[in-house]
Amino acid sequence: TKKKISLKKKKKKMPQQRFPKIEILSIQPHHIQFILSETDTSMANAIRRIMIAEVPTLAIDLVEYAENSSVLNDEYIAHRLGLLPIRYVPEGSMRGGDCHTAFLPHTECVCYDRCPRCSVEFELDVDFDKVNMTRPDQDRDLPLTVTSRDLISNNILVAPAHFLNEEEQDEAHDEGISIVKLGPGQNLKLKAIARMGISKEHAKWCPVAVATYRFWPIITINDEACQMLTMEQKQELVEACPDRILELDEITGNLVAVENAYEMATYTEDLKVAQDAMKKRPEDDDFVKVEPSTDRFVFSVETTGAMDAEEVLFSALRVLKDRMNYLAAEVEKLKD
C-alpha cells in the first residue's frame, strides 16, 4: 500500500485566538463603566495600566514667578499648579480629548525653549487690594481665594478643568480649584508652562482618579437541589450573603440572582458555610455557586477632568495598538 503525502503547507490557526469585545454599561463625561469580554486578565491588566500610566495629557511643568507675597512659598504653589487637571478640547468638539496629535513631547520638539507646538502658557496676576475693591461689602474682610479660574491660557483650546460636573460646581464654594488665599497687601503674579507627558514620568499627568476592574460573577443556582429546602432555609441563604446577590422570587419562591449582582459580588465564604450546614452529606452538590469569570471583566473608570472618560478608553486602546504594531515591526526586523 502506498501513502499519498501532501506537500502543501497547512494554514496554521493561532492557538486560543481571542476577539475581545467591549460593552458600555454607563457613560458620563467623568465616569465610564464597561464590560471587557472574550479575553483574559493579561489584556484587562494591560488596558488598566495604560489608562493609569501611558495616556498622554497636559500638565503644568514649569512655573516662573514675577512676585509672590502670599503665605505659601514658590515650591508649594508650583506643586499645587502641577496637580491642576489641564483640559484640551479639540476644535469643533465639546469633550476633553487626546492631546497627542495637537502637541509634541517637549524632549522631541526642535524649539530652543518652548513653542506653541510643545507647550501652553498660562498667566496669573491677582492683587488682593485691586480685586477687593470690586467685591461685595460683606466679603471685603475675608481672604481672597486664588483659583484655577484666574489662570489665563494663550491657547483657546486648552484650559484648567475647574469642576468634574455641574453637580460639583453647584456644591463648590469657590469658582474653581483653590490654589492659595491672599490677604491685604498680598499679590501673586506668575507664568506657568504646561507640557504633554505621561504618568510614568510624573503622577500629575495621570488622566484617571480611579481605574479598576472586577471579575464578572458566574452565579449557578441548582434548582433541583433547592427544591429540598424550606422557605426558611432559602431565606437564610439570601441573608447569608453579605453582598446581597440573591433574592426570593415573589411568585415562585425560588432563589434567583439580583439584577446588579455583578456590582456587588465579593466572593465571600459566608454563602458556602451556610449551605454546607444545610447539606445532608458533605459530598452533595452546592445549592448556589458563585465563581469569578476568567474572561469577563467589569471596568470602572473615573477621570480627573483632564479628559472625558470615553476618550481615556479610546486613547488607551490607541496606545496599546501602537505598542503591538511596534513590537510586530521589531520582530519582522529580527527575521531579516
Image (tube, rainbow, N blue to C red):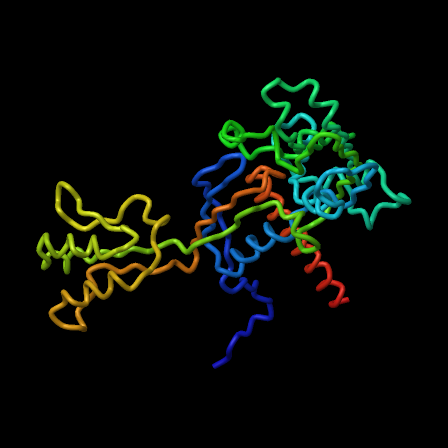
Which residue is situated farthest in the right direction here? 112
As rendered, which of 147 and 256 lies closer to the eye? 147
Tell me: 103 left or right of 23: right
Q: Which residue sits at x=46%, y=41%?
A: 24
Provide residue 13's location: percent of width, then percent of height. 54, 62
Q: Which residue sits at x=48%, y=48%?
A: 21
Quarter of the image where one finds residue 65: top right
Tell me: 151 left or right of 95: right
Which residue is situated farthest in the bottom direction here? 1
As rendered, which of 135 and 98 lies closer to the eye? 135
Q: Which residue sits at x=78%, y=47%?
A: 105
Quarter of the image where one finds residue 86: top right
Q: Which residue sits at x=13%, y=72%?
A: 281
Provide residue 306's location: percent of width, then percent of height. 63, 39
Provide residue 96's location: percent of width, then percent of height. 63, 34
Q: In which quarter of the image is the C terminus?
A: bottom right
As rendered, which of 92 and 114 lies closer to the eye? 114
Q: In this view, does 15 lie above or below 108?
A: below
Tell me: 222 left or right of 174: left
Q: Is residue 269 above or below residue 230?
A: below
Q: In this view, does 110 lie above or below 88?
A: below
